[in-house]
Image: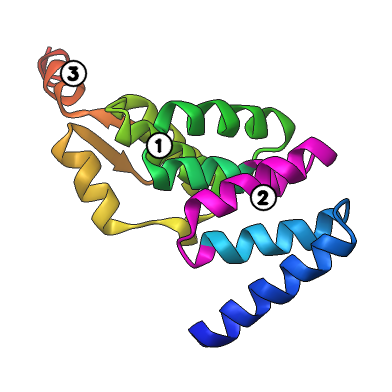
Amino acid sequence: MSNQEDEQTIEILKEALAVSPENVPLRRHLAELQLRLGRIEEAIEQFQAVLERSNDHASRVNLGRAYYQRGDFERAEQLLQTALEQQATPELYLLLSKNAFARQEYERAGHYYDQALKADESLRESSYEEELARQGIVIRRGAGPTRHSDQRQAAPAALC
């Protein structure tokens, strides 16, 4: 869709919601489109309205994503943890990892990233792994995340 088509779609969805404000799928569609277009505040408002009407897992995850994109990592964490209690998905683990990284919780970031990869190897991002490595977190296939310092401490014991 072009930007103009997206804007027209948003207006049509808003008009439809004026007639049917309790229509959760319609409201969720509007919020998802707003999030995709970077209209974070509007998306947050719509996702919150969805969650007032429904315990929708995807909307909770996307609301967490919106807060993450806004830089409100604490609020994102709360929502994403609640979503994790509802249903764990590889994409949710990846988002939790990136949120933990933004909060400078690098070991947690490595743990969540490892969980995402165990469930779906296609989520592997070499550039993100490099960022984790700069913080001392090494991701090994099948071995889970380790700290660089863990490797150094384990080496002398292996020599004994």
What is the x, y in percent for residue 102? 31, 35
Marks 1 and 3, the one that precedes in the sequence:
1
Magenta stretch, main secondary structure, is helix
What is the x, y in percent for residue 134? 14, 39
Magenta residues (range): 36-60
- Amino acid type assigned to the residue bearing label 1 in the image: Asn
Q: Secondary structure at mark 3?
A: helix
Quadrant assignment for the C terminus? top left
Distance, label 3 to label 2, CA atoms, is 50 Å
Distance, label 1 to label 3, CA atoms, is 29 Å
Q: Which mark is residue 99?
A: 1
What is the x, y in percent for residue 92? 56, 44
Q: Residue at x 48, y 62 (%)?
A: 122
Quadrant assignment for the N terminus? bottom right
Check the image and report above or below for 28 versus 142: below
- Give the class, few, some or many, for how many residues have Cα within 10 Å of label 1's Cα (few <14, many ≥20): many
Q: Which residue is mark 2?
A: 46
Check the image and report above or below for 43 versus 8: above
Q: In the rendered structure, does residue 49 fall within the stretch colored magenta?
A: yes
Q: Which mark is residue 154?
A: 3
Q: Secondary structure at mark 1?
A: helix
* Cβ atoms at labels 2 and 1 below 8 Å apart: no
Res. 51 in view: yes
**15 sits to left or right of 132:** right
Q: Nearer the viewer, residue 41 or 59?
A: 41
